[in-house]
Image (cartoon, helix red, strand yellow):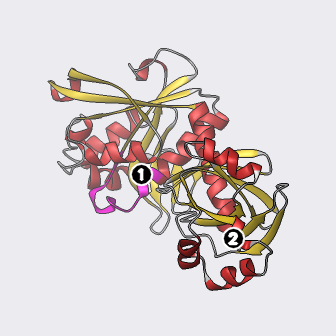
Amino acid sequence: MILETKRLILRPWEESDAEECYKYAKDPLVGPICGWTPHINIAESKRIIKNVLSAPETYAVVWKETKLPIGNIVLKMGTDTDLTEKEDECELGYWLGVPYWGKGIMPEAAEELLRHAFEELGMQKVWCAYYDGNEKSKRVQEKCGFQYQWTSHDADVPLLQEKRTGHVNCLTKKEWDRRKQQELGVHLLKACDTLLLGIIDENGFPAIYPMEKVASVGIEKVLFITKINSDKVKAICKCEKGCIECYADESIVWLWGNIEIIKDFEKIKRILPEKYWERLMKHENYRDYCVLFFQSKTAKIYIDGKKYILKEEL
């Protein structure tokens, strides 16, 4: 099996990779934090490739620019993991050469292997763990959506003949699917040229005006004008967070998040862009309108009836 990402190729290890494997696996910054001793020579790396890295679902992480391996990633199954005994669950493990740290490489590799695990191998849960102090591994797991499960304060580290504090996380198929929807929702919104500002009348019918482009991290704010006494506003006032209807190109979008309802007309005039202020002034009884100011780090998004979650960190 060969898997591919934008910058990486994940393929089985070959004995001819021994020299490159040794180049990174000999570094004392790599093995010990993962629970194994640094390789002592190329011959040892070749032996480990033959006897350990040849296990099913074990992949050399190959940097496309050089076509050479720079790390390892694996889905441990069956007796290869002590975190689960279920056939539809496995454990993710990985290590990466020091020169490639801090480039987002391991999250990129892990995301592809997780896709493979859930979509092609039928896994329902993937486990992952790290030893106390391994902040880089912790961050990889956080980026990939793993959720904390438990901490073991006397975890055995057989290859180093010691005990450590270990932290165990997992990611379920259900959570994986939800994260993919999050990313799709953000992608759909970013792909839109504009959002639209709507003015709702008493019957809930909108008149649409163009709005500013979606920010790079998603939606930073939405200004939405509506009748103060309309049913929509009354419903929003009863909600702690509220919801806003707007449009992304031709798709209807519902945003659910923190909303400030502004009825002070002088304040509305200050925060509303001039072109929208001018359009609002053309409406009869314009003082009966208020502005809903939406600004939230997390929002539920409904696009054509499907729900997505927008998070600022995405």
- Residue 295 position, x and y percent, is 52, 60
Q: Which residue, given by chain and number where applicable, does mark 2 sit on?
A: 287
Q: Nearer the viewer, mark 1 or mark 2?
A: 2
- Residue 254 position, x and y percent, is 71, 52
Quick check: is 43 in the magenta stretch? Answer: no
Q: Which mark is residue 79?
A: none
Q: How many labels does the image show?
A: 2
Q: Give the extent of the magenta segment.
A: 95-107
Q: Residue at x 51, y 56 (%)?
A: 296
Report, in whole angstroms, how far the alpha carbon at label 1 lies from the one at label 2.
55 Å
SS under mark 2: helix
Q: Against 303, is 225 above or below?
A: below
> Crowding at label 1, few (<14), some or many (≥20) Cα neighbours within 10 Å?
many
The amino acid beneath tag 2 is: Arg
> Is residue 99 or residue 21 the one in the foreground?
99
> Is residue 139 or residue 302 the one in the foreground?
302
Q: Do the residues labelled 1 and 2 touch (CB within 8 Å)?
A: no
* Quadrant housing residue 189: bottom right
- Describe residue 19's horizontal placement relative to residue 228 as left or right: left
Q: Against 241, is 52 above or below?
A: above
SS under mark 1: helix
Q: Which mark is residue 106?
A: 1
Compare marks 1 and 2 and give the one earlier in the sequence: 1
The amino acid beneath tag 1 is: Met
